[in-house]
Amino acid sequence: MAFDPQQPFVRADGLEHGLTQKIMRGPGYRQLFRNVLVSAATPPTALQRVRGAMALQRADAWASHVSAARVKGVPIPTIADEHVSVAHQKLRRHHAGIRAHVGDPSGVVVERGIRVSGDVPMFIELGGQLGLVDLVVVGDWLVRWRGLTPEQLVDACRSSRHRDSRKALAAARLVRRSVDSPMETRLRLLLVLAGLPEPEVNLLIRDELGEVVRRYDLCYPLVRVAVEYDGRLHVEVVARWEDDLERRADMDDDDWRLLVVTGSGIYKDPLRTLRRVHRVLLARGMPGVPALLSDDWRPHFPGHADAA
C-alpha cells in the first residue's frame, strides 16, 4: 500500500519514505503510541487510535474487546487502553497503552478495513471490561442494529469457555428486542434491578382499525402506565414537542398515565425515579409490585443522590 501519513504509521515507515526524525518530532505529526505517528492535520478519533494500535501488531492480529466495539460504533463508556488479540501467547506484542490478549481467530471479521472480533465474541470479551448495565446496553444495541437475537447471545455465552462468559451471560439474560437507545436500556434496568416488574419495550398501541397511534418506550399495559426517557431533543425540536403534547392529550383520553424520566432521573437521582414509578404502579394495582424496593440497583447506579 502507498504510504499515507494521514493514516497511523510506525516511525520506521516514515523514515523509509523520506521523513526525518526532526520532522516527525515537529508540530506536523501527532504521536498516538510510542513510535506510532499520524499527520496532525487529521482529527483525532477513536477509530484512528485503533488503527494506530494495529500498526504495531502482526498482520494476523485483530482488534478485540473495547477496540472492536469502537470500530463497530458500539455505545460503550470511555476506556483508555486499546485491546488487541492474537492466536498464540508467543505472538503477543506489549506496548504502553495497548493490552494484548490471546483469543480464538475463528470469530474474526473485517470491518472498516480492520480485523476485529465478531459481534458475539466481542460481547463476551466485554464481560470483563464493562459493568452489567453497560454490557446490557451493548447487547440491546447488537440486537437492535446488528441483527442478533437475545437467544443467540444467551446460547453463545452458555457454550463459551471464555473467562468472562459468566458475566456476559448475566447481561445476555437481560437483553431485549426493539430497544431504541442506551438510555432506554438504563431506565429499564433501573426499574428491574429495583425489583419492579419488567416493563414491555416499545409497545405499539393501535386504534379500532388496527392503525398504530402511539408507541411507548417502556410500559405496563395491564394498568396503562408508560415510562419514557425524555432527552433534550424532545424539548428543543418544536415539531417533536407539539407531537408529544398531542400524544399526551390522547393518552389522557385513554386513561394512560405517562411518567417522563430525564437524564438526571437516572444519573443524579434514580431513587426519586424509582419511588415515582413504584407509587404509581401500586396505586394502579399492578400485580407483582413489591411493598419495598430492592437495593440491588444501587451498585449499578453509583451516582445516586443519597450515595452518602
Image (cartoon, helix red, strand yellow):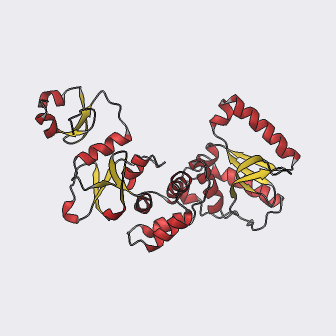
How many numbered callouts? 0
The picture places residue 146, in percent across and down from the top left corner, at 50, 53
- Residue drawn at x 22%, y 59% as measured from the top left: 92
Q: Is residue 16 above or below residue 300?
A: above
In the rendered image, which quarter is residue 289 located in? Answer: bottom right
In the rendered image, which quarter is residue 43 located in? Answer: top left
Q: Is residue 126 above or below residue 214?
A: below
- Residue drawn at x 51%, y 66% as measured from the top left: 152
The picture places residue 5, in percent across and down from the top left corner, at 23, 32
Q: Is residue 64 left or right of residue 294?
A: left
- Residue drawn at x 59%, y 53% as measured from the top left: 185
Q: Is residue 35 left or right of residue 171?
A: left
Residue toward you, 97 or 93: 93
Q: Is residue 220 left or right of residue 1?
A: right
Residue toward you, 211 or 220: 211
- Residue drawn at x 76%, y 46% as measured from the top left: 214
The picture places residue 4, in percent across and down from the top left corner, at 24, 33
Q: Is residue 35 visible?
A: yes
The picture places residue 307, in percent across and down from the top left corner, at 57, 53
Q: Is residue 170 visible?
A: no
Q: Is residue 136 left or right of residue 84?
A: right
